[in-house]
Image: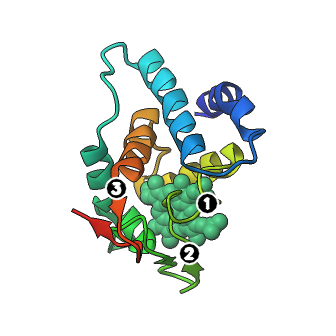
Amino acid sequence: MRKTACFLMLALGALSLNAQADVETAKAFAKKYAAIAKNINPDFKGFLPDMGRNFFKREFTLKGKQVSCSSCHTDNPANPGKHIVTGKPIKPLSPVVEKSRFSDLEKVEKNFTEHCNNILGRDCTAQEKGNYIAYLLTVKFDVQGNEQK
Ligand code: HEC
């Protein structure tokens, strides 16, 4: 796993220099994750936003409780989240409404690794991370930041 993390850092390293936090950076991350996913799985066909959405909502049993990424981040990436343990507010994950998201590679990787390990008991794959970013980028928002279906 360490090895993968190192590889990710190298592959994505150049991007972390880009302080301009926005949707373009998130797209660039998705591209890099695609390169990694293809490297791991030659049959890789691209990211699937629907799978990204389902993945985020999927519940796992943790110490007898059902938890998912949505437990803290909510089902809607445009919504502010709330930490289920500390109750602290969490800024929305969507780079569309929260410019600081997906701007800093180290932070993205650190958060993905920590949260995936907490919830799934393992790091998320490049495919899973890419699916989620693809989902984030396909979601449309109204002026209040609510998702439009
Ligand atoms: C127990 C609460 C909790 C759960 C569950 C959780 N997260 Fe997080 N997550 C946080 C907090 C808190 C932050 C924000 C820290 C901050 O605001 O900078 C965060 C930030 C992130 C970020 C950072 C994005 C960025 O660029 O700033 C990513 C990516 C992320 N989480 C992915 C996930 C994924 C994937 C899952 C499910 C496997 C998940 N999280 C589940 C609490 C949680």
Q: Nearer the viewer, mark 1 or mark 2?
A: 1
**Image coords of residue 79 (percent x, y):** 43, 73
Residue identified by numbered label 3: 139
Q: Nearer the N terminus, badge 2 or badge 3?
A: 2
Residue drawn at x 33%, y 68% is 75
Amino acid identity at mark 2: Ile
Q: Nearer the N terminus, badge 1 or badge 3?
A: 1
Crowd around label 2: few <14 · some 14–19 · many ≥20 (10 Å): some
Q: CA distance from mark 1 to mark 3?
A: 15 Å
Tag count: 3
Determine whether the beta carbon of the residue marked 2 sits less than 8 angstroms from the nearest atom of ligand 1: yes
Amino acid identity at mark 1: Lys
Question: Would residue 62 be visible to someone looking at this image?
Answer: no
Which mark, residue 99?
A: 1
Residue drawn at x 67%, y 43% is 105
Q: Which SS class for mark 1?
A: loop
**Image coords of residue 129 (percent x, y):** 45, 42
**Image coords of residue 87 (percent x, y):** 54, 86
Residue identified by numbered label 2: 90
Decide which of 7, 118 is in the foreground and name it. Answer: 7
